[in-house]
Image: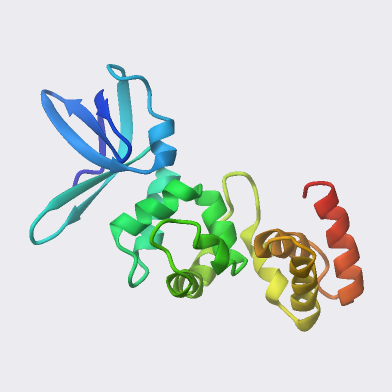
Amino acid sequence: MIASLRGTLIHTDNVSAVVECSGVGFRLAVTKNTLYRLPQKGQEVFLYTFLAVREDALDLYGFIDADELEAFRLITAVNGVGAKIGIAILSEFSPSQLRIYIASGDAKALTAASGVGIKLAQRIVLELKDKVGAIETDDGIDLKAVGNATLNSSTKEAVAALVSLGYTQSEASLAVGRLDTSLSTEELIKQALKQLARGL
């Protein structure tokens, strides 16, 4: 399997990049996040890769860092999520954002990605919630804390109240999950609002 490529970036378009290695040009499907972080054409580039082998094609996918590649592997392990949808999801969200949405059960947020309906988004959350809970994001957010927001009725009610006030499921879960889960619903809401007012 081709695990990575280092070479000269010779072409890009909206969905792919071509990297020349020893005279051979490799076309890689890439996320928008990777596309925006590529160097200028003619410069050296290093990409982590994933090779998808199908009956009628060999498709190569490129990622700017190992975190994005791991998020791609994680998301495409879900039944019904192919490589094309995996790329669409990671074009819409960073790996950290994706993990936060999954850990907080925010299926609605995932539907912002092209080709992801609510049923597929719910399946992604259901299948991956436990897997992402033990991971710490690269910006230091503890996903276990996000999962704490569904521990008991008080935390669930506090999250629901914050959502009804206009906060997203992810924002509410993150704020409530950082608090002492033994607090009353009212106290959880009050303290979470203070956190949200400070921008978490």
Q: Which coloring applies here?
A: rainbow
- Is 188 placed above or below 50 here? below
Where residue 115 sits, quadrant-wise, is bottom left
- Where residue 34 appears, as percent x and y from the top left, is 40, 37
Position of residue 27 in the picture relative to residue 181 (left or right): left
- Is 88 placed above or below 10 here? below
* Residue farthest toward the top in the current orientation of the protein: 42
- Where residue 161 appears, as percent x and y from the top left, is 80, 72
* Residue farthest toward the bottom in the current orientation of the protein: 153
Front in this rendered view, residue 102 or 1: 102
Where residue 195 sits, quadrant-wise, is bottom right
In this rendering, does residue 89 appear at all? yes
Residue drawn at point x = 67 percent, y = 65 percent: 169
- Is 166 placed above or below 8 here? below
- Where residue 118 appears, as percent x and y from the top left, is 48, 71
- Is 131 placed above or below 70 here? below
Front in this rendered view, residue 182 or 110: 110
Front in this rendered view, residue 40 or 4: 40
Position of residue 14 in the picture relative to residue 24 (left or right): right
Position of residue 172 in the picture relative to residue 113 (left or right): right
* Residue farthest toward the left in the current orientation of the protein: 56
Residue drawn at point x = 52 percent, y = 56 percent: 98
Residue drawn at point x = 36 percent, y = 51 percent: 87
